[in-house]
Amino acid sequence: MPKAWSKKDERQYEHIKKTEMQQQGRSEERAEEIAAATVNKQRKKEGRTKEQKSSSRKS
């Protein structure tokens, strides 16, 4: 798990992963992807992520 994740984020990740595997019947790999994306989405919503620098456009 990423270093930037809190203990709460790790618990949420494990819970989502377990739920996806047991109730939704997904593979462990896919469940991990879904769980990580969900945790990262929540962190971004709460403003706990670094904003990505905007790239320059070529005209």
Image (cartoon, rainbow, N blue to C red):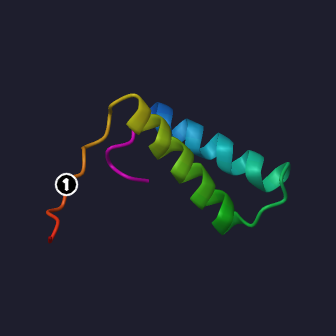
In magenta segment, residue 4: yes
**Image height of 36 relative to 26, above or below:** above
SS for dot 1: loop
On the image, numbered disc 1 is attached to which residue?
54
Say which residue appears at 51% left-offset and 42% top-offset: 39
Query: Seen in the image, is 19 located left or right of residue 30?
Result: right
- Give percent across and percent down for residue 24: 83, 53
- Give whichever of 42, 58 is nearer the camera: 58
Tally of numbered tags: 1
Q: Quadrant of residue 49?
A: top left
The magenta stretch spans which residues?
1-6
What is the quadrant of the C terminus in the image?
bottom left
Query: Seen in the image, is 55 located left or right of residue 43?
Result: left
Amino acid at the residue labelled 1: Ser
- Give whichever of 39, 17 is nearer the camera: 39
In magenta segment, residue 57: no
**Image height of 30 relative to 21, above or below:** below
Say which residue appears at 19% left-offset and 54% top-offset: 54
- Give whichever of 8, 35 is nearer the camera: 35
